[in-house]
Every structure is written in C-alpha cells, then in structure tokens.
Image (cartoon, rainbow, N blue to C red):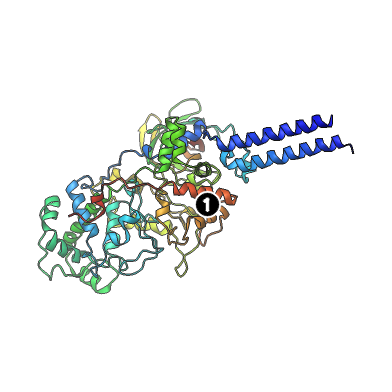
Amino acid sequence: MKKQTITIVATVVITVVVLFAAFYYLMPTIGARYLHPLMMGGEATSEPANLDTSTSILSDQEWFRVSYTSNENPLPLNQVHSWTLHVETADGQPVENAEISVDGGMPQHGHGLPTSPQVTENLGSGDYLVEGMKFQMLGWWEVRFGISADGRSDTVTFNLILE
Amino acid sequence: MKRTYLIAAGIILLAVALWIGISANTRRDSWTESETTTLRSLWIGSLPPLPPDPSNAYAEDSAAAVFGQRLFFDTRFSSNGAVSCATCHIPGLMFTDGLPLAHGVGTTSRKTMTIVGTAYSPWMFWDGRKDSQWAQALAPMESAVEHGGTRTQYAHLIDEFYRTDYEAIFGELPDFSDQTRFPSVAGPVDDEAARAAWEAMSPEDRDTVTRLYANMGKAIAAYERLIMPGPSRFDKYVEGLLNDDQQAMQDALTKDEVAGLRLFIGQAQCIKCHNGPLFTNNDFHNTGVPAAKGLPVDDGRASGVQKALADEFNCLSQWSDAGGNDCAELRFVTSEGEQLLGAFKPPTLRNVAETGPYMHAGQFATLEEVILHYNTAAVGPVGHTELEPLHLNPTQREQLEALLRALSGPLLLPPELLQAPR
C-alpha cells in the first residue's frame, strides 16, 4: 500500500473517532432532541401522527354527530371541570333524550380516566352536561361516549392532547 | 503530495479539536417552544392562587390559623403527652421526619408526607383516604400509633387550656364538665375501652364532641394552608428562560442539571405524574414499588378510596361546610378498577432532596435508589405497574439526580410560623 493511502485512511479514521467521541460526550449537553426516540432507548410515547383531535365528529356507526365544549379553555391539568356534549342525528336534528355513558383513558399508558365523569343534566336541544371530567397527565387522551337514543346505540371517541 | 495530505489531516484534526473546545466551553441553553411551555408549567410562578376549601368555613380565618398553629405544636394532645403534629411534621425537615416509617406513640406502616403545598391537593395521605387538610389532620390524632388520644380527651384539653381561643373563633364552648356524660377517654378508636365509653354516650353528646373535634381540624388546616414552597434554583432558571436571559439561566443551573431537566421532561418521563408547579398531579399511580420489609402488602388507593367515601369527615359529611356541588372530586371519584391496586400518590418533588427516605414506606434511602427503580421498572408486589424501563445510562442518572437536588428552596412563610406561637 502506498504511504499516501495510509495517511488518508488514518486521517479519516482519526476524524471519525474524534467526531464520535465528541458526539458521545456532548450528547448529554445538547440533549436528546436531535435524536430519533428509538436511539434514546426505544421510548416512543408521542401520539400517532395525524391524530384526529376534532371536537365534532360522527359516531362509529354514523348514527350521531357529536361535539363537545369544555367550560375551561384550554383543557386544564389536574382540575375537575365540566363539558357540554351536543348530540344530533347525522342529518342535524338534535337528539333530546339520549342515555349517555362516559369512559376514556390514555391508550399509551393502559389506564383510564382518573375520575368517573357522568352526564348529570339534560340541558335540552341535544345538549348534555358532563360533570367530573379530569386529566392528570400530559399527552394523548381518549374520551369515549356511549350514546343510546331512539332505539339506536352507538359510541364516539374523541382524541385530545393535553400540553 | 504526501506532505499535502499530512497538512490537510492536521488542519482537519485541529478544526475538530477547536470545535469540541468551543462547544464544550461556550454554553447556550436552547429550548423549543413546546419545551418552554412545559418548563413554564413546572415553574413556581405558574402556581395558581390557593383554591378555596369550601368544606372548611374557617380556612381563611387568621385567628383560626393561629389557634391551629398552637394545636399543631402542642404535645398535650396525645396519650403520652409527648406527641404533636410537629413530632412527625418537623418544620426544619420540610415538615417531614427523615424516617422510613412515621413514629408517634407507636410506629405506623407509612412514611410521613410533607405538608408543604398540600392545600392544593384534593386528596391526602399516600392512599388519598382523606379529601381535605382538616379531615386529614384529625386522623393521626385518633390513631393508636400516632397521637394515640381520643376526641373527648381533646375536648377536655380545649376546655382547660384553649377556651378563650376556641370561643373567639367558633362561638360558645359546650360544657364538658360532667364526667359521666363526657368521659375523659372516649372516641371511635381501636382501643376497646375508649370505644365502649364512646358508644355509651348519647348521640347528642357525641355530636357535641365531634363538632369541637372537627373544628380543631379546621383550625389546624387554616394554619397548614399557609405552608407553601418558595422558589428553587430550577425556578430561577425558568425565569431566566422566560426573560431570554442566558446569564441568569447559567447562574441558576449547571450543565449537568440542565441535562437532567431535559431527561425529566423527556426520556425519563418523570413529568407524566410529577407535573404542574408542585411537581405532582396529586393522583394515584402504581409504579411497582417493592413492599416494605416486615409489612403486609399495601394495596394503596384501592382501599384508600373506599375509606374516603366512608369517611365521617369527608366533603359530603355533616361536619363539612361544603354544599354537595362543591365536592366534585368525591362525587366523581373512581372507586373501582385495576388501576387503583397498589397505586400511591406521587409526592411533590419540591425539596425532595431534603425529604428522604423515599416511597410510601421509606423503601429507598437515597434518590439514587429511587432513580434506579424507575430505570429498571421492576414488577411490584401488587397490581400492574405503569412503568417501562427508561434505559438511562449512569451519567444520565446522575444528571437527573442533580436536577432533583436543584428543586430545593426555602419555605415561603415567615419564621414565626415554623414554631409554636408565642
């Protein structure tokens, strides 16, 4: 091998080693945010991309269009608050006498809501008061409502991200 | 030609060395917008005004707070005359006691929690078996291993030593002088004789005593509401960040502490439960903490929530000053489910370096052990742990611990509140 080639190879090797060492030692300082989560130990707890966080959606079988508003905006952390749920038929008629159950949780943590919210009042015109809502962690939450009205039962799941 | 390569190699090496030197020595902490939002949410300046306690009509009464402070430090309110609230909640130790298990007239099965900032918590104790500060304050007083006393004993003590203080706040003190109606030792406690004496009393007399007892709790709570944390170096760092003041940031936290902070809100996932300006969500989580040696398995919140619902002093009880609609946490509490089993309240991390040992029965002596536990995510003795391994290397674990040590700060109350009033 020519001496020149050896020099080039040595230079490249040394440069790579030095760069690697610099990267390794500086990583704790510059932080992990430039790295893919998998490089940082397989943590992948961020919510899925393109998560639909609409507050007005069709139920699973498309019987109802359901929307919610919170009495606290933005959604509060660690605080019991209320929602108003609005239920109408797919063609826009308010559903006045629905039976509604509430459920939910954090899909990535395998636990439910910290409280057991309930519909406590039928406000009329398809509006229902949901009391006892609470989120105690930041991140992706699902809130599910089971809705029965006029002989039809359906479920609807809202996604929301608490920041 | 050979020479040219050697020179080129030399220049590259020099440049790299220079780059490392500059990167290592000039520090500029940069945070994304969303990270800054997260850091601001942990900042003490984000602490909202103290929420009212509708269950305690005397919560904001300054005379009640002084009276409560007297009771807090008064060892006469115990079976042996040697135990007060301050026996376990030592002001100089951030209102904890430095012990694995609390020690009153006997030894309990849990570690003493701090009082600092608990006015913000909807649930008290590791298992949340009480839903207000005043209801909490009454539990140790009748525990056989803490104060060891009874409520009629306390009524007689108030009658003897605090009649004026009491009447100035709560109105006329009932006449407890008839020893046949008000025995010196009687209450709904473990001790059989005291319990029998209590049950022999008329319902009206029992209510008279219990009303006074509840008022004692409300006075103690009025004092405890004043016990708040002050800013730590972490808070000065966030202040610097919000003011775009690199110098203030660098004066507040070292590079290792900042690296620990990135881990805290990132890979280490501490912020999942230790969120908000008190670094706790005051909820309940199973983190697979090992059982304490010599103690039975503790199911935590699963039993705690049932006790809270049945508690004679809860928000919906006759002794509470709240209207039914004020008690949302209790009305909508989750009382069943796997997630409650072995779940305990995440304590505040403010002053965590001063409040060891750690976990609900002091299972871990040091922060290093705590971080190792979260890093490995070992399976716990009961229920399902919410943890997953964190894969932090030793350097990162040290950085995280450094950050935790930067969460200490002075209490935000005048020194005269740290001892019995004169």
Residue B410 shows in the view: yes
Mark 1 lies on residue: B386
Name the outermost residue toward the bottom.
B193
Residue beneath the point at 11% across and 58% down:
B163
- The N terminus of chain B - image quarter: top right
- Foreground: B201 or B238? B238
Please identify the quarter of the rendering in which residue A26 is found: top right
Q: Is residue B313 left or right of residue B256?
A: left
Location of residue B58 in the rendering, given as x and y in whole percent from the top left corner: 20, 48
Residue A71, above or below B104: above
Location of residue A124 in the rendering, given as x and y in whole percent from the top left corner: 36, 31
Name the outermost residue toward the right.
A1
Please identify the quarter of the rendering in which residue B135 is found: bottom left
- Chain where mark 1 sits: B
Q: How many marks?
A: 1
- Asked which secondary structure carries label 1, the reply is loop
Residue B43, above or below B225: above
Q: Is residue B141 left or right of residue A81?
A: left
Q: Amino acid at mark 1?
A: Glu
Q: Is residue B266 left or right of residue B418?
A: right
Residue B390 shows in the view: no
- The C terminus of chain B - image quarter: bottom left
Residue beneath the point at 36% across and 59% down:
B112
Mark 1 surroundings within 10 Å by alpha-carbon count, few (fewer than 14), some (14 through 19), many (20 or more):
some
- Foreground: B3 or B71? B3
Location of residue A36 in the rendering, given as x and y in whole percent from the top left corner: 63, 38
Name the outermost residue toward the front.
B3
- Foreground: B327 or B267? B267
Residue beneath the point at 50% across and 41% down:
B258
Location of residue B8 in the rendering, given as x and y in whole percent from the top left corner: 76, 30
